Amino acid sequence: PQQEEGSVYLEVSRSGGDVTDDRRTFTHYRQPVLESLQPSYGYTQGNQAVRIRGFGFGYSRSETALCRFGNRTPSVARWVSSREVICDSPTIDPMVDPSRQATVRVAMNGLDFTTDAHSPVFTYREHPSAVSIHPSIVSADGGTAVTIEGKNIENALRCRFGSLGEPVPVL
């Protein structure tokens, strides 16, 4: 039956008379409301830590809280606060799932997932790769515009020259 949020002791009775005194804790909670994902996209290879923000995560401090991206196998949700949990995005095969989108849901008890109606959507992208760079030799003083052609770079915001360099904005 629907109950107020909180914990109670669960006791049982065989005949309605004698009641056990086992003092087993049983918790009622309200389903969390998911408001946003940060980031809301990641690569098809998965393993992107995704912050799920909302409210009602107060009872998720145990290993029973799970996240589900679309119809993929659920993963453990890492509790941050009553307003946030972190989950890792699973891998997808774009050939099997061409929409590249997954509704994100959370189950505080590992069973009852939030509904799709108001759940945020995580979008998968292919990992970018550079195919050609022109010019490939420039002055160390900088300031030279470089043209990069590649695959899946239409949403690239920054690029880095060298492993220690600071990422620079894409123009």
Image: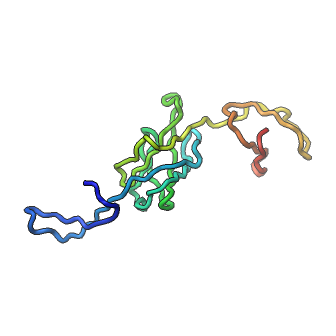
Q: Residue at x 77, y 31 (%)?
A: 132
Residue 168, percent from left and from top: 78, 46
Residue 102, percent from left and from top: 49, 38
Q: Is residue 136 above or below residue 142?
A: above
Q: Residue at x 41, y 55 (%)?
A: 65
Q: Is residue 121 above or below residue 96?
A: below
Within the image, what quadrant is residue 70 found in?
A: top left
Q: Residue at x 32, y 65 (%)?
A: 7
Q: Residue at x 52, y 53 (%)?
A: 53
> Is 75 or 31 nearer to us in this picture?
31
| Quarter in which the C terminus is drawn | top right
Residue 121, percent from left and from top: 51, 41
Residue 166, percent from left and from top: 77, 50
| Quarter in which the N terminus is drawn | bottom left
In this rendering, position of residue 39 left or right of residue 54 = right
Q: How is the image coloured?
A: rainbow
> Is 79 or 152 nearer to us in this picture?
79
In this rendering, position of residue 132 left or right of residue 48 = right
